[in-house]
Amino acid sequence: MNVEISEVANLPTKFGDFKIQAFKELLSNGCFKEHLAIFTDPIPETPVVRVHSECLTGDALGSRKCDCGEQLEFALHMIQSQGGMVIYLRQEGRNIGLLNKVNAYALQDRGLDTVAANHQLGFSADERTYEMVETILAHFEIEKIRLLTNNPKKIESLEGIEIVERLPIIVEANPHNITYLQTKKEKMGHLF
Ligand SMILES: Nc1nc2c(ncn2[C@@H]2O[C@H](COP(=O)(O)OP(=O)(O)OP(=O)(O)O)[C@@H](O)[C@H]2O)c(=O)[nH]1
Ligand SMILES: [Zn+2]
């Protein structure tokens, strides 16, 4: 994997002080994706790690259609107190991209659920990959982690990494995301 790595910089946040480092993944077609590691100093030997996939609408705009923004805040809060890292991967919309995700939302407005909408657009329910996680953890010489997730498929996909513990990520449902959360549980096997 061809990756360009930035320097480490300070990132003070409302959750406390973190360090930040960017990882630019150079793709074979000349395109690139820029990912982030946001971490405490020091990083414990077996850190809490959150592998978070980009959700512009949830993370930055406060969308109530999903639980992403609240999950990110939960993760930053816990990692600030226990030590560890958020790996922020730029795979928007479970890696179908922002434009396709908005089209999926339009289909959801017409009654399809989050999985059916992806299928209608010609995608699988989840198009994400996690190779970058191994690259980033190897960069920090992290060999084992406590993974913050409810998603068993994410645990399977991280097969090269020793996950000593799964920590649940708990956020409250709201009337707008309750069906989305139910679909994640029933169709995608999420552990709630
Ligand atoms: N295609 C699509 N992507 C969505 C939708 N809602 C959220 N996402 C994307 O889903 C990703 C987050 O995935 P989730 O399934 O919420 O959570 P997860 O990371 O698989 O599992 P956890 O670790 O338990 O949070 C982000 O990339 C979001 O942009 C949707 O309705 N359609
Ligand atoms: Zn989201």
Image: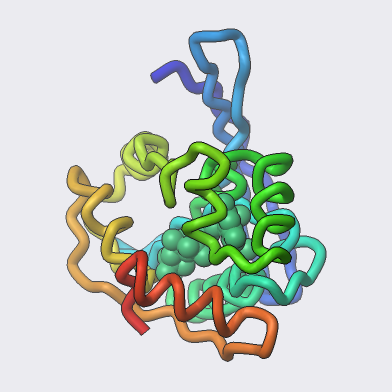
Q: At which x and y percent is residue 139?
A: 38, 36
Q: Is residue 77 above or below residue 151?
A: below
Q: Is residue 39 visible?
A: no
Q: At which x and y percent is residue 132?
A: 41, 36
Q: Is residue 140 left or right of residue 10?
A: left
Tell me what residue is drawn at x 68 percent, y 72 percent.
65
- In the displayed orientation, state which residue is furthest to the right: 61
Q: Residue 49 appears in which quarter of the rendering?
A: bottom left
Q: At which x and y percent is residue 51?
A: 44, 56
- The colour scheme of the drawn protein is rainbow
Quarter of the rendering occupied by the N terminus: top left
Q: Is residue 60 left or right of residue 125?
A: right
Q: At which x and y percent is residue 6?
A: 61, 31
Report the number of discs.
0
**Viewer-proximal residue among 37 and 26:** 26
Tell me what residue is drawn at x 52 percent, y 16 percent.
27
Q: Is residue 11 above or below residue 2?
A: below
Q: Is residue 28 visible?
A: yes
Quarter of the rendering occupied by the C terminus: bottom left
Q: Residue 84 appears in which quarter of the rendering?
A: bottom left
Q: Residue 168 appears in which quarter of the rendering?
A: bottom left
**Viewer-proximal residue among 84 and 42:** 84
Tell me what residue is drawn at x 58 percent, y 63 percent.
112
